[in-house]
Image (tube, grey):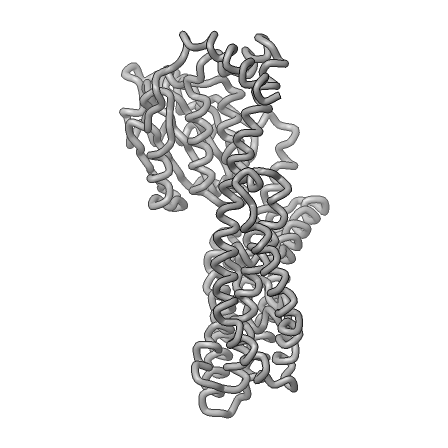
C-alpha cells in the first residue's frame, strides 16, 4: 500500500513541477510593535526568523490593549481601524504609495488581548482568500484563549506562511476537483509519515526525561530509605508521607520494568501509537518518584529539625508566597481590583506573609513545633482557597449576564481548580501537597479558569454572528486593503 501511494503521489506531483514555486525564504524583515506588553520577544523573534515563506515577506506584529467591553458588532471594525490608524501614524511604509492598500510584500498580525480580537492584513501581492485568513486566525485562537500570547502569535504566522502565495496545485479545492480520492490517499500517506515522525521525537524526549528522573531516584534510593525510617510516625504529616513511602519501592520496581521496556524499543517501535502509553507511564512515574523522594527527605529534615531544616521549610512556604505575589496581576486582568473580595485577598496576603514569618521565627527559637508551623501553611492555603472562591463570584457577576453564562464560568473555574498536575510538566510536590492534596487554590489556575470561562461566554454570544469584518470604519476613508479580524 505504501509503495502504491508513493507511486501515485510521485506521478501527481510530477504534473505540477512546472508550477513549482521558488525556494522557501525567511522573512525579509520582522517588526514587532508590542504596545500591549504581552509578548516575550526573546522567544518570539528567533521563532519568527525560522519560519519559511514562499516569497520574501515583511512580517509586522502589532499588539494593543483595546476596550474589553466593546460590543461584538463593532469590535471587529474597531480593530481594523486601529491597525490602519497605527500604520498611518507610526509605519507609513506599511501602506501603498497611493494610500489605498497595504504595501506589497507585507503581512500584518494584530492582537488585542483585552478585547480578545485578532486581525490579519496583507499586501496586494500577499493577500489570501477570506477562508484562508480565517484559518490563520483560527490557528492562534486556542492558544490565545489560554493567554499564550507569544505561542499563539508564532502559530498564526506559521499558518500564514503556509497559505500566503500558496500555488494552485496545493489548494485543497483544486486537489478535490482534480481527484478527491488521490488527495485523500496522498494526504493519508503524508499524515502517517508526519505523525510517525512526531511520535518518534516525542517518545524520545519523554524517555530522556524519564531516564533523568529515574537516575536521580536510583542514586538517592538508600538515602530515601534512611530518611523514611527516621520520620516520626506520630506526626500527622509524617504519617501521611509514610503512606506514600509504603508503595515507593513497588512503584520504583514498576518504573524499572517500564524503563527496561522502553529502552528495548527501536525507532520503528517508537513511531507506533502502541509505544506512547508505556513511554508516558515511564516518564510520569519516574518524575513522580523523583518528587516523592524529595518530599520524604524534607519531611525527615523538618520534623526532626535536622541540618538544613531552614531550606526544607522554605520549600514548603515558598509556593504559597509565590501565589500571593500573583494577586495584583490577577486583579489587573479581571478588572476587579476595587471590589470587596479583592480587598479581602490583599489584606489576607499581608496577614499571611506575617504568619509565615512568625512561624519560621518560632521554628528557629523552638517556640513553634514543625507540625504547628506546617499547620500555619495548610490553614493559610485553605483560607486563600476560600477567599478566591468568594472573589470568583465577583468576577462571575461582572462577566456573566445570565444564569447560563454564570454556569459556564463556574464550570470553567472548577475544571481548572481540580485539574491534575502532571509531574513531568514541571510540578514538584511538597509536604503539604502530599499530606493534603489541593489544600489551596493556585492563583494561576484561578486566572486560567476565568480566561477559559470568559472565552466560552464570548463564543456563546457570538455564535450567531458572522464573526469577522473586513471594513475599516469611517476613519478608513477609501482604504480597501486586504484584511479581516475576528474574536477569540
Q: Where is residue 191 shown, x and y percent of the image?
A: 56, 28
**For this rendering, which residue is in front, 170 or 413?**
170
Q: Residue at horizontal 48%, vertical 44%? A: 148
Q: Pinpoint residue 239: horizontal percent, then vertical percent.
A: 65, 80
The residue shown at (50%, 40%) is: 115
Q: Quadrant of the C terminus?
A: top right
Q: Quadrant of residue 371?
A: bottom right
Q: Position of residue 197 (x, y in %)?
A: 51, 35
Residue nearest the viewer, comparing 486 with 144:
144
| Residue 473 visible (yes or no) | no
Q: Is residue 479 above or below residue 67?
A: above
406 lies left or right of 307: right
Q: Furthest residue to the right?
A: 403
Q: From what the image shows, is residue 60 above or below residue 320?
A: above
Q: On the rendered structure, is 333 left or right of 398?
A: left
Look at the image and tell me whether residue 476 can be seen: yes
Q: In which quadrant of the rendered image does the N terminus lie?
A: top right
**Residue 470 image point, x, y percent:** 48, 22
How many labels were placed on the picture? Answer: 0
- Relative depth, front residue between 222 and 202: 222
Q: Quadrant of residue 145?
A: top right
Which residue lies at the image location 41% right of the left edge and 17% below the top edge? 165
**Residue located at (46% from left, 22% from top):** 163
Q: Is residue 464 above or below residue 295?
A: above
Amino acid at each position: 500500500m505504501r509503495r502504491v501511494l508513493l507511486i501515485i503521489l510521485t506521478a501527481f506531483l510530477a504534473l505540477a513541477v512546472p508550477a513549482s514555486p521558488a525556494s522557501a525564504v525567511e522573512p525579509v524583515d520582522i517588526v514587532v510593535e508590542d504596545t500591549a506588553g504581552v509578548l516575550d520577544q526573546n522567544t518570539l523573534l528567533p521563532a519568527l526568523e525560522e519560519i519559511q515563506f514562499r516569497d520574501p515577506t515583511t512580517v509586522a506584529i502589532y499588539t494593543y490593549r483595546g476596550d474589553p467591553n466593546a460590543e461584538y458588532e463593532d469590535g471587529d471594525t474597531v480593530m481594523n481601524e486601529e491597525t490602519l490608524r497605527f500604520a498611518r501614524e507610526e509605519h507609513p511604509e506599511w501602506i501603498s504609495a497611493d494610500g489605498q492598500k497595504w504595501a506589497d510584500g507585507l503581512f500584518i498580525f494584530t492582537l488585542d488581548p483585552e478585547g480578545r480580537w485578532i486581525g490579519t492584513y496583507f499586501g496586494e501581492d500577499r493577500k489570501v482568500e477570506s477562508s484562508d485568513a480565517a484559518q490563520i486566525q483560527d490557528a492562534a485562537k486556542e492558544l490565545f484563549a489560554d493567554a499564550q500570547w507569544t505561542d499563539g502569535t508564532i502559530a498564526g504566522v506559521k499558518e500564514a506562511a503556509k497559505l500566503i502565495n500558496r500555488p494552485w496545485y496545493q489548494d485543497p479545492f483544486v486537489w478535490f476537483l482534480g481527484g478527491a480520492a488521490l488527495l485523500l490517499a496522498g494526504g493519508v500517506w503524508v499524515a502517517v509519515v508526519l505523525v510517525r515522525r512526531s511520535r518518534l521525537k516525542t517518545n524520545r524526549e519523554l524517555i530522556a526525561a524519564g531516564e533523568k528522573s529515574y537516575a536521580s531516584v536510583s542514586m538517592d534510593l538508600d538515602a530515601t530509605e534512611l530518611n523514611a525510617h527516621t520520620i516520626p510516625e506520630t506526626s500527622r504529616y509524617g504519617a501521611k508521607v509514610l503512606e506514600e513511602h509504603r508503595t515507593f519501592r513497588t512503584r520504583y520496581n514498576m518504573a524499572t520494568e517500564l524503563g527496561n521496556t522502553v529502552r528495548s524499543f527501536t525507532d520503528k517501535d517508537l513511531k507506533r501509537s502502541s509505544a506512547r502509553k508505556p513511554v508516558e507511564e515511564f516518564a510520569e512515574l519516574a518524575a513522580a518518584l523523583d518528587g516523592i523522594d524529595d518530599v520524604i527527605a524534607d519531611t525527615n529534615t523538618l520534623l526532626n529539625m535536622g541540618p538544613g531544616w531552614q531550606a526544607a521549610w522554605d520549600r514548603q512556604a515558598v509556593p504559597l508566597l509565590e501565589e500571593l505575589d500573583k494577586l495584583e496581576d490577577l486583579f489587573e486582568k479581571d478588572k476587579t481590583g476595587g471590589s470587596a473580595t479583592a480587598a479581602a485577598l490583599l489584606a489576607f496576603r499581608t496577614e499571611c506573609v506575617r504568619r509565615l514569618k512568625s512561624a519560621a521565627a518560632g521554628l528557629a527559637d523552638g517556640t513553634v513545633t514543625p507540625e504547628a508551623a506546617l499547620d500555619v501553611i495548610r490553614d493559610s492555603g485553605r483560607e486563600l482557597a476560600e477567599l478566591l472562591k468568594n472573589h470568583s463570584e465577583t468576577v462571575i457577576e461582572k462577566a456573566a449576564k445570565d444564569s447560563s453564562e454564570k454556569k459556564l464560568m463556574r464550570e470553567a473555574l472548577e475544571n481548572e481548580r481540580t485539574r491534575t498536575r502532571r509531574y513531568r510538566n514541571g510540578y514538584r510536590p511538597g509536604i503539604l501537597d502530599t499530606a493534603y492534596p489541593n489544600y489551596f487554590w493556585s492563583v494561576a489556575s484561578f486566572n486560567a479558569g476565568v480566561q477559559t470561562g470568559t472565552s466560552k461566554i464570548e463564543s456563546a454570544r457570538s455564535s450567531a454572528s458572522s464573526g469577522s469584518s473586513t471594513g475599516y470604519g469611517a476613519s478608513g476613508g477609501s482604504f480597501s486593503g486586504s484584511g479581516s479580524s475576528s474574536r477569540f
